[in-house]
Amino acid sequence: MGALLRIRDLRIGFGRAEALHGIDLTVGEGARVGIIGESGSGKSVTALATMGLLPDTARVSGSIELGGRQLVGLSDTGFARLRGDVVSMIFQEPMTALDPTMRVGRQVAEVLRLHQGAPAGRARERVIEMLSQVGLPDPERISMSFPHQLSGGQRQRALIAMALINQPELVICDEPTTALDVTVQARVLRLLDEQLDAAGAACLFISHDLAVVSQVCDEVLVMYRGTIVESGPIAQVLENPQHPYTAGLIATARIDQIEPGRPLPVIENFWDGKEGRP
Amino acid sequence: MRRSHPLVVGAVLVGLICILAVVSFFWTPHDPGLVDASIALQPPSRTYPLGTDGFGQDIFSRILVGARICMLVGVMAVTIGALLGVPIGILAGMSRRHVGRRIMRWADIFYAFPALLLAILLAAANGTGSTMTAMIAIGISSIPAFARVANTASRSVMSRDFVAAARSSGIGWTAIAWRHVLPNILPVVLVQVSSALGRAILAEAALSYLGVGTQPTTPTWGRMLYDAQKFVYDHPAQIAVPAVFIAITVLGFNLLGDGLREALDPRLRQEA
Amino acid sequence: MTDDEPDPGVPVFEARGVSRTFRRSGTRGRVLTTALDGVDLTVRPGQRLGIVGESGSGKSTLIRVLDALLPPSSGEVLFRGRRIDNASSRQLGDLRSSVQMVFQDPRSSLDPRMTVGDIITEPLRSPLLRSRPDVPRNHGERLAEVLEQVELEADAAGHYPHEFSGGERQRIAIARAIAPRPDVLIADEAVSALDVSVRAHVLNLFADLVRSDRLTLIFVSHDLAVVRHVCDHVAVMRSGRIVESGPIEQIYASPAREYTRNLLASVPKLRVRTASSRRTATEVPDEMPPGPDDPPA
Amino acid sequence: MRALGAIARQLLSLAGSLLIASFIVFALINALPGDVAATILGPNSDPASIAALRERMGLDRPLLLRYVEWLGGLLTGQPGSSALSGAPIGSIIGPKLAVTAWLATLSMLMGVVLAVPTGLYSAVRRKRADGVIISGLTQVAMAVPHFLVGLVLMIVFAVTLRWLPANGYTPLTSNPLQWLRHLVLPVAAIAVVEAAMLIRYVRSAFIDVLNEDYFRTARAVGWRFVPAVIRHGLRNASLEVITVAGLQLASLFVGSIVVENVFLLPGLGSQLLTAVNQRDLPVVQAIVMIFVAIVLVINTVVDICYHLLDPRVRAQDEETSS
């Protein structure tokens, strides 16, 4: 498997502050890489940089290669051609991520037409097919609905349909289930898993929840304050964490294995925040 | 780096006009009401820094006294509008949704009475207009804007959990209004005060210009423009002085409002 | 029965056939949504009750009705044997002074324009609480005490909420709740907005407080695994009804209802995904009904 | 069908507002302390002529009865007669209405045509030099009263350059070219100020949209910046802008009162001021009521447009009507 996404020494700064201090990561074709870290650790910034969606004020240096194309310094037009076609993104907030004034079907169809130039009739057929593929009941009706008429889970499914309809090579998921209920989360995760498999797409999956990442990904990167403190195949990291922060994360995620009544482990039991900081 | 500019520039301009208004109480270079046809329409000179008008009155003295009226009407009108509008808005915002909507619908009727129309009505009913009718008219017409701003803001405060927390520990409605709602909506109300002041001063100028506000014997910037208009063919520069002062004052308040909005809205702060 | 010495036999809360409907607009015109549908519930002194369910299951409505923040559409709510549904605010003195709440999102539950000290001592200044003898008189002293209890620095009192991290803010919210020495603590999704790594810290705090102050606890969550760590009883809610309730270990070990089993299975667990498990990456049973994910907001 | 119900409710509420507003107008003139006849005749009038005027205007009859009569007169287009000439008010006002209507409509059109593209442009370029300059210019234009812009335009184009007439009016039907020449300056005076305000609203509405999640989604699926703004921004921003533009149309009618007086256009505004100066209270009362009604009608039309455009409001409607 070749490398689809290769990031080298990526640094991102806003004003005087630097949000990302030179990270390296590689996502192979069809691979699933999770990025885990607390809020503000730089995981979302990494995703936005790959999509070219950082605000104008951001300073980016280093290299992001997607399928051999250099993305750092790419023009907006260049990015626009890739976005939604080669690389797509699923965001955290399904409630606000769809245009409230446009019917759902039309929003999905737009993505198709934008990149494939399919005629309206064909596009509509494909949209209905895609909506049913992401497990939306009565896709005809859903496609004619406005976003506010759908539940959070349904909206997230519609957004997944938008992200996958052009069979992208890479799907970036930024906390895609954090805003959802546990049962809905489980179903959406399973859907993502199936759809990524079916499309053979690679995935960069961002979450603060190690348990969620462990269910979707093969590899994991642990980020802390703008650096990657640990990375590797997920089994290896879980069984034999090298960095105390990772050990702390694993312990806090194993809440179901602690006997009730005993205090739960916290990160500070493992790491004081200083030792082993790169 | 640019973000604090509107606030500073606005504050400086407004401060300048306030100083003029205060100075006018103690000192003017000449008697602003002294008519002397022999020195009419003089260009600026050492004795008459901004020249004289068609009646031979010193323009600078009249500008100083005009600043007083302009600030007086603006401040009083906005006080009326805020003191009536904000409580209405808070009341509506703290009531149940459909009750609040009904209250706001009543307040909205005042939108149909812009300051100018209301002032004309009051002036007509009174026989003549006065500084007082102008103040009242502008004040009443600014009620719905204050009510609307306060209503939206307090409704969003009421939906926050700290209000539920206060209620669940037995804090009463008045205490919630004072302790939680008012402090949280104060920033938006302040912004509204500033832009309402700008609008009030524009309205005052228009009323004086039309002669339905402060009576022509008292110097006002709007009336000075009206008087200067007669000489528009031969002395067009006559309108420049009062025009510039009106524009400076309104610009000052508008900038102040924008600056406050930026300074107080965290989302805009990041945006800038 | 006196207020300060509650009879251990009298339930703290009792709900009898409580229903609550809201008028909402749906996809097909105006509808009445039933948030609560004939709920019966008894909370005994010292009990630590977890209420579990998905969003829209009515759990948040239930605690708001229990705390008399919302009136029920029908049914009776009793606090220590006295009716509190449709009671005037003056009649709620006992409830307001004995029960405190912790909310989900501290960004919303802490007034951004108040200092931490003012926030925490606000319940002490409530007119309904001042009448109670055991409410601390010395606000400064009590403030220092509770700050220490929630493991915050004493100088935190002078700062504003936005200067703290999410976990710290939730601890401020807890400090406010315990400041007037309540007998009952109601927590509404109190750890769901927190990062997993911060969650453990706050849960430990809850467990410690409940134990040391011998509080009655009502803990609302969508996560059974979390509830298991702080509660001894659990009630599972779905569509406004309690579908299953009992001692937590019993329900955790052998849930009687399909719905409870699904809830348990849905909580993501740390597991290594191998190539062979790709097809069944998550353990949601297939018989999970494919209906709407959750009701439209 | 539901949309029709909402429109019907809006119209009903408009009727209610009109009724209340008409009562306020009537009460301010008639029920405020001070005798109407004495006010009309001024401070130096003798009691006999005051009594005669009271008799002629029927002021001795009950207030409520006079209000109902006046209301009926408004609906039939004859709200009484002038206190000075005795001419029916309908025939005094009728011809003036067209002038004001042309002035306001053309100003609004010109204002919107100026404002929407400029506002959009300055939102997109808000961090660039040209965006900042536009912002600054609108600030200045907003700080200037309508009549001042009118005076400046008059000095430049009528007095100095002598391209256009400084004042007066020719009806459209008698000479379209002259009609246009007379309207250009007044329309420009109003439009410049209104456009400045509108530009700021358009700009901030678009900046709001640029910060929305759905705009980010649109960019993430491959829209380039400007097409994304047009496809997903325009409709959402227009919702906000329509509300403001409606309120502005109201302020614009009022602005026309002042500008008509600057350019001596024989419209409703000039007539209103003349009536105020002549203390012709029945005429004042009628003209003010016309302005108030126009404002209320415009606001209702705006509300209806808003309801038709925003699917969320359409749904909310159903919620509130219960």
Image (spheres, coloured by chain):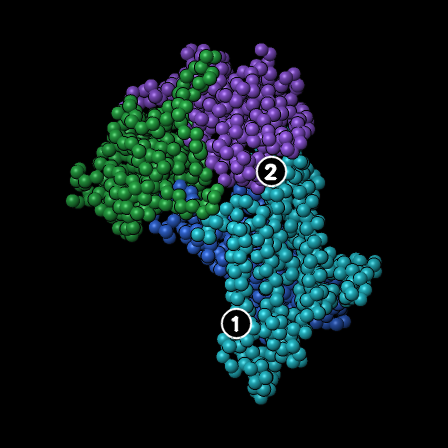
Chain colours: A purple, B blue, C green, D cyan
The residue tagged 2 is D210
Q: How crowded is the residue under tag 2: few (<14 C-alpha within 10 Å), some, or many (20+)? A: many
- Which numbered tag is attached to residue D27? 1
**Mark 1: which amino acid?**
Ala
x, y percent for residue B15 = 59, 52
x, y percent for residue D33 = 51, 76
Q: Is residue A230 visible?
A: no
Q: Quadrant of residue A59?
A: top right
A217 left or right, relative to C81:
right
Report helix, strand or loop for mark 2: helix
The residue positioned 43% from the left and 21% from the top of the image is: C282
Compare residues D238 and C256 and report the one nearer the observer.
C256
D186 left or right, relative to B93:
right
The residue positioned 73% from the left and 56% from the top of the image is: D188
Query: Count of labels shown?
Result: 2
Ranked by sequence position, the earlier of labels 2 and 1 is 1
Compare residues B240 and A234 and report the one nearer the observer.
A234
Determine the chain carrying the residue at label 1: D
